[in-house]
Amino acid sequence: MTQVTEITKSSLADNPVLSQMSIYDHEQIIFCNDNKTGLKAIIAIHNTALGPALGGTRMWNYKNEMEALNDVLRLSRGMSYKASISGLNLGGGKAVIMGDSKTQKNEALMRKFGQFVNSLGGKYITAEDVGIGTKDMEYVKMETNHVTGIPESMGGSGDPSPVTAFGVYMGMKASALEVWGSDSLSGKKVLVQGVGHVGEHLVRHLAKENANITITDINEERLMQIANETGAKVMLGDGIYDLDIDIYAPCALGATLNNNTLNRLKCSIISGAANNQLEDENVHGKMAMDKGMLYAPDFLINAGGLINVYSELKGYNREQALAKAEKIYDLTLDIFKQAKKQNITTAAAAKAIAEKRIGDKVIM
Ligand code: NAD
């Protein structure tokens, strides 16, 4: 993939779409509008060298179109890397629907979105993401076959989050082995930020291992429910970044590793499910490294969900999907080894391996 770096901020302001696409070498963007349902969506296809672009659909109340475009471009590139590093024959894509998933989502909107996905003839395959559940995928499925993560009752693989959480747990244990010489998380102080679909399952794995867990979420009702069920401690507000912890597990939204938080965090390991955790991958990966924090690259350790939906395309087998997600443990250790050997950040090491496979167009 050729990376165009000479684009200046001013040229981006004048040419916000095609110039943005060339920064990370995106293949195609589809803007979807439907006045009847109120659908406003963007589908970004980053790269299809290894296979069709697969990536979930996120519904979010974006401040404006540029924020939505930026999000979908970053997320779709992450999907290319995720598929590549996991050895899947998939490209990277993602979709965002602008709006409030609690009040603006309905059958008509999701079916219209499904029609747009269908119009791409399989070049893009969709699935769930933040704000979108298996029920929504049922509606999308009414309009297109290019969808995964549909309910088990319809022959699909259902919610991918448990497999994602298992993969994150594997990545976290591999990180523990790297830092402490043992992969046991017993007694380790872990902060899980976001106890949604993935965070909840991660907390359950950690609780089984007797980790010392603190959880935080903006949804206080859910936070209290998970705390009651798992015995985790609860913390609210921005003060979480000043806690005395061993492991920070971001499982909400991206960009929580930035100048502000990295100057406050005192953990040894950063290992969570959220996509695009580094606000600026060139700056903040290095900053974490310089501060002695081991960062487990997000697109590597959160690939369990993608592995799960990929398995659905091949005829779903839960055990096989979990066995493949377990390999995240060894892959993570390998990335740490590569990063050390080359004296680069773990994010850079993971990216280089993912880009190489895409560049080579290896069929595995
Ligand atoms: P989710 O929407 O079910 O859960 C996210 C949780 O984070 C919610 O409970 C929400 O209230 C909370 N949250 C949002 N903003 C917060 C904040 N500022 N502080 C604290 N909590 C906050 O989403 P999910 O499916 O659990 O995914 C979580 C993250 O993992 C996302 O970044 C997603 O892209 C990523 N991811 C998910 C999967 C998957 O299989 N679901 C796969 C790969 C990556």
Image: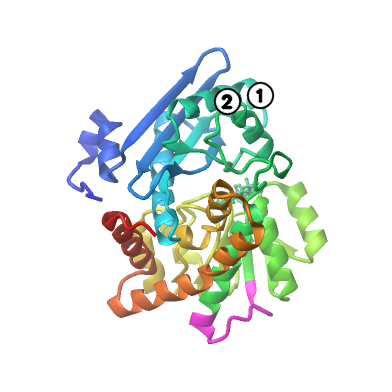
Q: Give the range drawn in magenta.
A: 177-189
- Specify the amino acid type for callout 1: Glu
Relative to 48, 12 lies left or right = left
Up the image or down, 157 lies above or below 229; here it is above
**Residue at image x 64%, y 74%?**
189
Q: Name the residue under label 1.
A: 107
Give me the residue at 52% from left, 35% from top: 146
Residue 134 picture location, percent across and down:
66, 39
Q: Where is residue 279 in the image (x, y as percent from the top left)?
A: 41, 53
**Quarter of the rendering containing residue 136:** top right
Looking at the image, is 357 positioned above or below residue 121?
below
Q: In this view, does 66 lie above or below 87?
A: above
Give the colouring mode of the picture.
rainbow
Mark 2 vs mark 1: in front: 2
Residue at 55% across, 29% down? 144
| Closer to the camera in the image, 267 or 270 | 270
Residue 143, disc: 2
Q: Which residue appears farthest toward the left when viewing the image?
A: 6
Q: Does residue 32 belong to the magenta stretch?
A: no
Q: Is residue 262 left or right of residue 322?
A: left
CA distance separating discs 2 and 1: 11 Å
In the rendered image, the vertical position of residue 303 relative to residue 211, given as above or below: above
Q: Position of residue 227 (x, y in %)?
A: 77, 60
- Name which residue type carries label 2: Glu
The answer to if 180 sits in the magenta stretch is yes
Query: Could you tell me what secondary structure mostly forms the magenta stretch?
Result: loop
Report x, y in % for residue 275: 49, 52
Mark 1 residue element = helix
Query: Of marks 2 and 1, which one's residue comes earlier in the chain?
Result: 1
Residue farthest top in this picture:
36
